Amino acid sequence: MKPDWRQVVTNPAEVQIFEALEDPQWQWRSIGALSRVSGLPESEVRSVLYKYPSLVRKSSVPSADGQDLFTLQQRYYENKNPFDKGWDFLAPSSSSTSS
């Protein structure tokens, strides 16, 4: 089980980003959308997302307009089907946020 972001993220600006990632209205969020919600520049949002690789997952498929998309690792895992969860358990570990 992935850690709950509330136990790790304490900076108020970073908390805004994680609250936006957790918004049930959206499964995936772009850096631009997270920037608008948090009021932080896109460069800072990107830094925060990459600061917490165990909490944030980058989509392997970009948005229709080519933007990177992100979600909470915990949310991603909870929405996976049982077969994919088993495959993740058996496959070698790697971070999808490093590229």
Image (cartoon, rainbow, N blue to C red):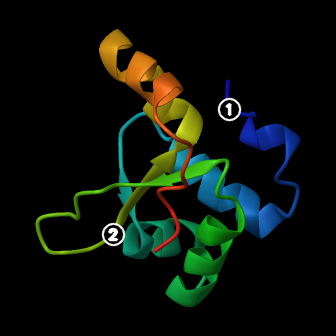
Is the residue marked by circle 2 packed among few (<14), some (14-19), or many (20+) residues within 10 Å? some
Q: Quadrant of the C terminus?
A: bottom left
Q: Tally the numbered discs.
A: 2
At a point 34% along the width and 55% down the height, the residue shown is 59
Q: Measured along the vertical axis of the image, is residue 78 above or below residue 31?
A: above
Badge 2 marks a residue whose secondary structure is loop
Of all residues, the one furthest to the top in this rendering is 82
Q: Which residue is mark 2?
A: 68
Per the rendering, the mark at residue 2 is 1
Is the residue marked by circle 1 packed among few (<14), some (14-19), or many (20+) residues within 10 Å? few
At a point 74% along the width and 34% down the height, the residue shown is 4
Q: Left or right: 48 with respect to 24?
A: right
Q: Identify the amino acid type marked 1.
A: Lys
Q: Left or right: 57 with respect to 32?
A: right
Q: Left or right: 58 with respect to 94?
A: left
Q: Please tell me which residue lies in front, 2 or 69.
A: 2
Looking at the image, is mark 2 or mark 1 earlier in the sequence? Answer: 1
x, y (%) of residue 58?
43, 58
Per the rendering, the mark at residue 89 is none
Badge 1 marks a residue whose secondary structure is loop
x, y (%) of residue 7?
86, 39
Contact between labelled residues 1 and 2, with CB atoms less than 8 Å apart = no
At a point 57% along the width and 32% down the height, the residue shown is 74
Q: Nearer the viewer, mark 2 or mark 1?
A: 1
Q: Quadrant of the N terminus?
A: top right
State the image quarter where residue 40 is shown.
bottom right
x, y (%) of residue 10?
88, 55
State the image quarter where residue 87 is shown.
top left
